[in-house]
Image (cartoon, rainbow, N blue to C red):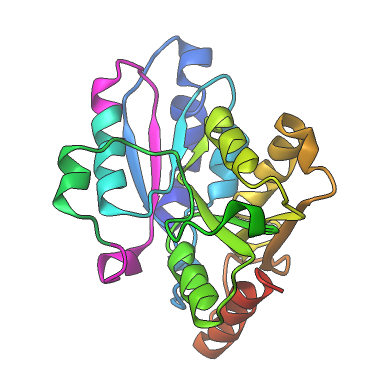
């Protein structure tokens, strides 16, 4: 995060507004470590909220892939799709060691980038009352909690591309579960940070049917991206995961 902070003036001046301000297109790729992993404020956030605030008019692609294959196909698509715009990828370090975050070979050779990943547990859509929507490594913690506690009325889905918001894919996801009572955007970041300040507005504007159903699950609003105390981090993380199903 520290390097991103120092580069903010260059990001504002030449990357986010490069085409609109200078008439210059760029295929630059920025890989930013991001994830609440108990390592303190300077090692927890790539400032997703800042990037999403800069996004408009298709200016950039902002993504947070949760599997190796989807990460591969994201980079491959960026190189081959012929659309010249910056790509910002948030990548939690802990997923390099996470055994659950693996992909079979065929996902690399036969698949493609998926901007929205529905619940691989395939719960009965008619029985699902709550949809937990998240990004990144948090998915694995949420899925483990759901399975451990035998929760059957909640689906856990992943939003792999934050901008441009995949409207059609999200619409298909919401339509898949006709009896939804709540859609819970769940993030590790504090309430005033992460993707929520962007998604809280964008989702209800693009999907009016979510008004009254969309809820946020996160840490409380904070001045720093994360606590500097490992034990406090563990308590906060456990609360986020459990509150997603409360």
Foreground pick, 130 / 236: 130
On screen, 61 above or below 188? above
Residue lying at 63% horizontally and 73% vertically, measured from the top left = 240
Q: Position of residue 229 (x, y in %)?
A: 54, 85
Task: Residue 209 in the image: state x and y as whole percent.
Answer: 79, 38
Q: Is residue 106 left or right of residue 65?
A: left
Which quadrant of the structure image shows residue 207? top right
Residue 201 in sight: yes
Residue most extreme to the bottom: 231
The answer to whether 231 is drawn above or below residue 171 in the figure is below
Q: Quadrant of the C terminus?
A: bottom right
| Count of all numbered marks drawn on residues in the image | 0
Q: Measuring 72% from the left and 45% from the top, which residue is drawn there?
A: 200
Residue that protrudes farthest toward the top in the picture: 23
Q: Is residue 26 above or below residue 161?
A: above
Residue drawn at x 29%, y 29% as measured from the top left: 77
Instruction: Let me know if residue 83 is in the magenta part.
Output: yes
In the rendered image, the quadrant that contains the N terminus is bottom left
Residue at position x 46%, y 38% in the image:
62
- Image position of 38 (left or right of 78): right
Q: For this rendering, which residue is in front, 225 or 191?
A: 191
Q: Is residue 187 visible?
A: no
Q: Return the x and y of residue 130 as percentages of the image width and height.
A: 68, 59
What's drawn in magenta, residue-wise? Answer: 78-101
User: Is residue 126 magenta-colored?
Assistant: no
User: Measured from the top left, where is residue 2 in percent x and y?
Assistant: 44, 58
Left or right: 86 with respect to 234? Answer: left
- Residue that extends furthest to the right in the rendered view of this protein: 212
């Amino acid at each position: 995060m520290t390097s991103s902070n120092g580069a903010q003036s260059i990001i504002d001046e030449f990357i986010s507004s490069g085409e609109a301000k200078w008439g210059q297109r760029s295929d630059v790729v920025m890989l930013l470590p991001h994830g609440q992993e108990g390592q303190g404020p300077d090692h927890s956030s790539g400032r997703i909220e800042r990037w999403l605030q800069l996004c408009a008019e298709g200016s950039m692609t902002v993504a947070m892939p949760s599997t190796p294959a989807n990460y591969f196909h994201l980079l491959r698509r960026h190189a081959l799709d012929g659309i010249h715009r910056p790509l910002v990828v948030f990548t939690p370090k802990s997923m390099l060691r996470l055994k659950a975050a693996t992909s079979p070979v065929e996902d690399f050779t036969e698949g493609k980038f998926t901007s929205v990943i529905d619940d691989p547990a395939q719960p009965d859509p008619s029985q699902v009352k709550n949809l937990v929507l998240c990004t990144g490594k948090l998915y694995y913690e949420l899925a483990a909690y759901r399975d451990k506690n035998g929760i059957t009325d909640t689906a856990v889905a992943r939003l792999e591309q934050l901008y441009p918001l995949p409207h059609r894919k999200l619409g298909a996801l919401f339509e898949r579960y006709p009896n939804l009572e709540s859609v819970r955007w769940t993030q590790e970041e504090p309430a005033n940070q992460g993707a929520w300040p962007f998604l809280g507005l964008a989702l209800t504007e693009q999907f009016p049917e979510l008004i009254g159903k969309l809820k946020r699950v996160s840490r409380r609003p904070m001045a720093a991206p994360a606590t500097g105390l490992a034990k406090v981090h563990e308590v906060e993380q456990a609360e986020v995961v459990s509150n997603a199903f409360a």
